[in-house]
Image: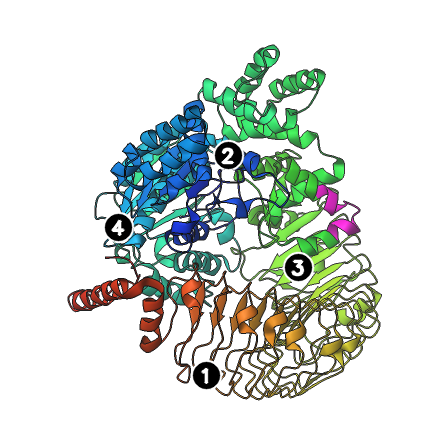
């Protein structure tokens, strides 16, 4: 199971897989020493493959060494880097001086440095022969004595004696190698977790806390346990929960860790997003549910049955277990749940919930953590010890404060330290101790960086960056450099979806700074985001010369209609967001500095708008109509860069955008007709016309030379497209489920194209020659049932993903041997395809799914597909044999019909092992009759 790095990670990130290398940067973690003649193509390859699948970096012999290096120095370095040594003693191990030298070096490293782990394996050899140099080992040393000095030989013997006495595994012909490999892997994972916990910066002085939480979890009991970790912001709740997760996750079948739950739930799709992340992590596949009820059902049917550990970080009163995960009683009795929160009352929902309170860090560990960030060592230099302790006092035992403060002081001169210490001690107006440290880091920002920081802290956590970058650029805030600075100062992050994330304490600091602009009159501040403050502002007739950013979401005033009178004195407003509210009146002469307008699910909109400075207009799900006067005002919007009209159901056609020459992004998802003239939109990069189900033809897009993304998925009525060859910069073309489209011209000349997704285009019969698409990375033509051929597919050097399942009319493909980068190949249900030429040369292929290809008779020798992980040929009824599978060490459980499966097992494992597998399967069948849970997947080599 995958441990989580203790440094703060992206919001709502999730984790579920095997153990990666999260230790300090070293090239290797495990060193394998073996005699290749004896075990290279059998046991050692299987062990190495298991380590690789678990993302454990293992060194195994000179094949790992960079070309041109001398072997001996490289071996010494690899041994020194590794923390775990696995010598595989076989019959001829001692006959190799290289093996003996490696072993002696490993023993020497253990003497010099603690923390190494020996895991000896005795492969078809008696451990006593190794320990006492008997049998073949005695004969080998007789030969060595004639060639090497007595001192060298004696050193080798002593190394064998030392390691030979250690507890290890004895592999014989009768016991299962798979069982041994699994046990070795478990030992390695546990040891790496222990090392990881000791060396990670954030885990200073945390072991005692971890043990206490583990005790509360009571892992030995068969009763779902819920643990709450409670404490103030910045105290280390997230770090502690990660450390606990790292320690115990290996004891569970499935694991999931999610950060930033509170911020996720503030989004419109928050609950569904959270469900999808949990389901995907537990099921280990990308899974998307459409609504909350579906999510609960999937969790009940597919997630609850697993023994799982689920950690949800930063939950508040918006989190309702039953509404997101279903009933606690439906989960496995061995499952465990950990929630971190500032609000203790959240945990009252769970009967019997155990609560662990996180207190301040001790002065000793505080100094150590501070030193790691300020000096990159565990302790301050002697001359800096006194002043370092002063900073530690200011931090008041808060890990977040120690980290940010140390990062700010790193590599700064003494005078800077002294000045900052005075500032830290002198700022008393903000309530919490950690805010003092955050405030100093904030004060170091430039004026424009401060503007961006405050915008994000107050309103934009969880928002995507693209549209906001347009607003900040229009205000000359320089967002590219500004965001980079905020990230470097540990004040924020961008998550995997390019959404803004902040630690909740840093967020609170930003909001406190804005609140201090006017303590008594919130409506006079620069940024207003709360329902009450927004209402006070709009009802007050005085001029507000501060307000720059305003969000209006007034749930308690459901019938309130807003007019231009409420907004007319907000002269400096640059961002306005109104949610689920009606707006009326003439806005054309007010809000002169407005750069970004978001109206979400507003039944009515203003008669017109002041668009002179507007760069982003977002009217998603609004009641705007074809005759709205604002469309005429839009002709003056020379700076408009982004327009979003998604799901504006009252619109029958897109407005005239021909004069909006600065447009970079248009989203008219679900609108019936395209704009009449887009020829002047030379800057347009993104065009989204998804789900425009009434759209019959898409003309006018041929000349959009700057277009990078064109998404037409779900345009089920479209029958005609213009020539796309003029889209010289197109990177992604999405046309999924354009079911009536019969032909697409010009695709073959899109040289910059990286992704072509047109699954479900049931009427497409030809695509043209694709051989010129040298940059194509992804091709999805699944379900194109009328497509008879794909010309040029064999000459796509960059192709990594090829999905063409259910292409029932394709009878042949070109020779695919040139697709050297191909990683995934889906041809399931290509019933007329008779042959796949060049398949055996796809050495980068990891996934090959070709079930129900009923006409394929031969595949060739697959032994060179060294990276193949998954293989499915079920239902390939004409296929008589599959050559070379037994050579693929990464491939453990290929899916195939029984007649081929037995043959494969025989060739890979031999008669004895096949008999064991058959017996194992029979026993499982008998057990299934008495168990409602059924059997686990067949795993050859286990008993």
Side of 465 relative to 149 (left or right): right
Which region is colored magenta?
471-482
Dot 3 or dot 1: first in sequence order is 3
Q: Nearer the viewer, mark 4 or mark 1?
A: 4
Q: Which residue is mark 1?
A: 857
Residue found 42% across the figure and 67% down from its top:
885
Q: Position of residue 761 (x, y in %)?
A: 58, 82
Which tag, 4 or 1, sits closer to the chain's start?
4
Name the secondary structure under disc 1.
Answer: loop
| Disc nearest the viewer among 2 and 3 | 2
Residue 902 appears left or right of 204: left
**Mark 3 to mark 4 CA distance (whole Å):** 70 Å
Q: Quadrant of residue 313?
A: top left
- Residue that mark 3 sits on: 598
- Disc 3 to disc 1, C-alpha distance: 59 Å
Say if the magenta span includes residue 350.
Answer: no
x then y, percent, for residue 698: 71, 81
Residue 172, numbered circle: 4
Q: CA distance from mark 4 to mark 1?
A: 39 Å
Q: Which labelled disc corresponds to residue 81?
A: 2
Residue shown at 25%/63% (left/top)? 912
**Residue 481 located within the stretch drawn in magenta:** yes
Mark 4 and mark 2 residues within 8 Å of each other at the beta carbon: no
| In the image: residue 347, left or right of residue 477 | left
Name the residue nearer the viewer: 770 or 27: 27
Rendered location of residue 501, percent (x, y) = 58, 46
Given contact means CB atoms under 8 Å apart, are the residues at marks 2 and 1 in contact?
Answer: no
Marks 2 and 3, how far apart at CA: 55 Å
Which quadrant would residue 306 be assigned to in this image? bottom left
Disc 3 secondary structure class = strand
């Amino acid at each position: 199971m995958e441990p989580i790095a203790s440094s703060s990670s992206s919001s709502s990130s999730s984790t579920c897989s095997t153990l990666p290398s999260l230790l300090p940067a070293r090239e290797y973690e495990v060193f394998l020493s073996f005699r290749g003649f004896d075990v290279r193509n059998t046991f050692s390859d299987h062990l190495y493959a298991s380590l690789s699948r678990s993302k454990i970096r293992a060194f195994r012999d000179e094949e790992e060494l960079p070309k041109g290096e001398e072997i001996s120095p490289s071996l010494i370095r690899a041994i020194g880097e590794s923390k775990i040594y696995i010598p595989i003693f076989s019959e001829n191990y001692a006959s190799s001086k290289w093996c003996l030298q490696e072993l002696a070096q490993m023993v020497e490293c253990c003497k010099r440095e603690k923390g190494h782990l020996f895991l000896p394996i005795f492969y078809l050899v008696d451990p006593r022969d190794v320990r006492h140099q008997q049998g073949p080992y005695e004969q080998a040393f007789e030969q060595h004595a004639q060639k090497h000095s007595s001192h060298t030989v004696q050193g080798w013997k002593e190394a064998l004696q030392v390691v030979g006495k250690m507890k290890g595994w004895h592999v014989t012909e009768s016991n299962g190698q798979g069982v041994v490999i699994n046990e070795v892997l478990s030992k390695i994972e546990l040891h790496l977790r222990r090392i990881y916990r000791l060396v990670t910066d954030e885990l200073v002085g945390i072991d005692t806390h971890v043990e206490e939480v583990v005790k509360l979890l009571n892992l030995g009991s068969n009763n779902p346990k819920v643990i709450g970790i409670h404490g103030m912001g910045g105290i280390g709740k997230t770090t502690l929960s990660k450390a606990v997760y790292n320690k115990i996750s290996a004891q569970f079948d499935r694991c999931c860790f999610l950060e930033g739950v509170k911020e996720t739930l503030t989004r419109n799709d928050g609950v569904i997003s959270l469900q999808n992340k949990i389901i995907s992590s537990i099921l280990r596949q990308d899974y998307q549910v459409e609504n909350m009820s579906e999510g609960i059902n999937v969790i009940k049917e597919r997630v609850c049955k697993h023994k799982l550990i689920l950690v949800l970080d930063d939950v508040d009163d918006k989190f309702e277990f039953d509404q997101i995960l279903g009933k606690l009683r439906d989960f496995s009795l061995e499952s465990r749940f950990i929630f971190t929160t500032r609000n203790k009352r959240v945990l009252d929902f769970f009967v019997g919930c155990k609560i662990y309170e996180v207190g301040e860090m001790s002065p000793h560990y505080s100094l150590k953590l501070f030193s790691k960030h300020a000096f990159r060592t565990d302790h301050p230099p002697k001359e800096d010890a006194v002043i370092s302790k002063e900073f530690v006092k200011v931090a008041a035992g808060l890990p977040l404060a120690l980290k940010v403060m140390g990062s700010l002081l790193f590599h700064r001169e003494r005078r800077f330290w002294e000045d900052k210490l005075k500032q830290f001690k002198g700022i008393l107006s903000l309530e919490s101790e950690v805010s003092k440290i955050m405030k100093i880091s904030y004060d170091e920002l430039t004026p424009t960086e401060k503007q961006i920081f405050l915008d994000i802290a107050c309103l934009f956590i969880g928002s995507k960056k693209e549209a906001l970058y347009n607003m900040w650029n229009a205000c000359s805030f320089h967002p590219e450099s500004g965001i980079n600075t905020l990230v470097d100062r540990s004040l924020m992050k961008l998550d995997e979806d390019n959404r803004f994330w902040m630690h909740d304490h840093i967020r609170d600091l930003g909001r406190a700074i804005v609140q201090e602009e006017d303590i008594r009159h919130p409506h006079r501040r620069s940024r207003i985001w709360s329902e009450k403050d927004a209402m006070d502002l709009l009802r007050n007739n005085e001029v507000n010369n501060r307000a720059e950013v305003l969000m209006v979401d007034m749930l308690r005033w459901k019938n309130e209609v807003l007019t231009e009178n409420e907004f007319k004195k907000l002269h400096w407003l640059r961002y306005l967001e109104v949610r689920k509210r009606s707006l009326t009146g003439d806005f054309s002469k007010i809000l002169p500095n407005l750069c970004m307008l978001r109206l979400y699910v507003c039944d009515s909109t203003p008669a017109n708008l002041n668009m002179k400075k507007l760069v982003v207009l977002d009217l998603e799900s609004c009641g705007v109509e074809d005759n709205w006067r604002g469309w005429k005002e839009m002709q003056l919007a020379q700076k408009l860069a982004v327009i979003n009209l998604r799901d504006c159901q009252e619109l029958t056609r897109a407005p005239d955008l021909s004069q909006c020459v600065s447009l970079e992004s248009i989203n008219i998802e679900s609108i019936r007709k395209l704009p009449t003239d887009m020829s002047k939109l030379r800057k347009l990069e993104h065009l989204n016309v998804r789900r425009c189900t009434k759209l019959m033809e898409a003309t006018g897009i041929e000349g959009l030379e700057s277009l990078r993304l064109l998404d037409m998925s779900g345009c089920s009525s479209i029958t005609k497209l213009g020539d796309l060859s003029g889209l010289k910069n197109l990177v992604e073309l999405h046309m999924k489920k354009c079911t009536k489209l019969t032909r697409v011209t010009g695709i073959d000349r899109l040289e910059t194209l990286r992704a072509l997704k047109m699954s479900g285009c049931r009427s497409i019969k030809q695509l043209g020659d694709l051989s010129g698409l040298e940059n194509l990375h992804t091709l999805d033509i699944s379900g194109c049932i009328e497509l008879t051929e794909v010309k040029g597919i064999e000459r796509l050097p960059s192709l990594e993903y090829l999905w063409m399942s259910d292409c029932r009319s394709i009878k042949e493909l070109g020779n695919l041997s040139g697709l050297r980068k191909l990683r995934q190949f889906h041809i399931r249900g290509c019933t007329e395809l008779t042959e796949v030429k060049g398949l055996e040369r796809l050495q980068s292929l990891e996934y090959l799914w070709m079930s129900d290809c009923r006409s394929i008779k031969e595949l060739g020798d697959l032994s060179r597909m060294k990276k193949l992980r998954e293989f499915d040929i079920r239902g390939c009824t004409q296929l008589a044999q599959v050559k070379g599978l037994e050579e693929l060490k990464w491939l453990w459980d290929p899916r195939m019909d029984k007649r081929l499966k037995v043959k494969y097992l025989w060739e890979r494992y031999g008669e004895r092992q096949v008999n064991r597998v058959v017996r194992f399967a029979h026993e499982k069948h008998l057990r299934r009759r008495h168990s409602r849970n059924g059997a686990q997947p067949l795993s050859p080599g286990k008993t």
